[in-house]
Amino acid sequence: MPDAPTSEQLRDRWLDRLSRLILTVQGWADARGWATRQIEITMEDSEIGKYKAPALLLQQEVTRVLLEPIARSAPGVQGVVDLYLMPAYDDIATLYLDDEGWHVHYVFPGTRTSPAISEAEPRPLSEDVLGEVLEDMRKNAV
């Protein structure tokens, strides 16, 4: 039976997953005309302690959005990241990582309203899905 991963291995695996997500989203957003800037935030996890994690600021005209890591793990998932409109932290989309990759939970226009974002119909993260979420957020910002 393999040894359980160390806290450093857990942290490094999570930061690698986050970095790849940030770079992917940054590339897609840049291609759609959004200005982007990576920042670092301080996080704390009961298993891996306090650490710095990447986040991504996106801006198009006066619309500002933040892609922010929330948790390295949660029941049934291997990572949680929120995408929200700033400064009011409205229009939250939540990205969950599972064995199949990142999925977006967002109440997309034309779908039935859900009482909680976690109950929204998930879609696999793709450039088109991200573009749809960002465009909807941009429209709701004005």
Image: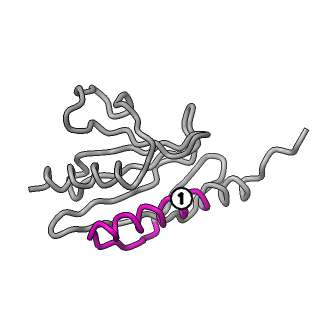
Q: Is residue 34 magenta?
A: yes
Q: Is residue 56 left or right of residue 35?
A: right
Q: Is residue 26 magenta?
A: yes
Q: Amino acid at mark 1?
A: Leu
For the point 21% across and 58% down, which residue is it? 87
The quadrant in which residue 20 appears is bottom right
Task: Tally the marks.
Answer: 1
Horizontal and vertical percent position of residue 53: 52, 63
Picture layout, residue 58 above or below residue 14: below
Task: Spot the residue most to the front.
Answer: 128
For the point 42% across and 71% down, which residue is it? 38
Task: Spot the residue most to the right.
Answer: 1
Q: Nearer the viewer, residue 116 or 33?
A: 33
Element at label 1? helix
Horizontal and vertical percent position of residue 107: 27, 36
What colour scheme governs how the chains and residues are painted in the rendered image of this protein?
one colour
Picture layout, residue 75 above or below residue 139: above
Q: Is residue 121 left or right of residue 43?
A: left
Find the magenta span and give its range: 16-40
Mark 1 Cα-neighbour bin, 10 Å: few <14, some 14–19, many ≥20 = many
Horizontal and vertical percent position of residue 37: 37, 73
Q: Is residue 79 left or right of residue 32?
A: right
- Magenta stretch mostly in which secondary structure? helix
Q: Quadrant of the C terminus?
A: bottom left
Horizontal and vertical percent position of residue 136: 20, 49
Q: Which residue is mark 1?
A: 18
For the point 50% across and 46% down, which residue is it? 102
Q: Quadrant of the N terminus?
A: top right
The quadrant in which residue 108 appears is top left
Q: Nearer the viewer, residue 47 or 96?
A: 96
For the point 33% across and 34% down, which residue is it? 117
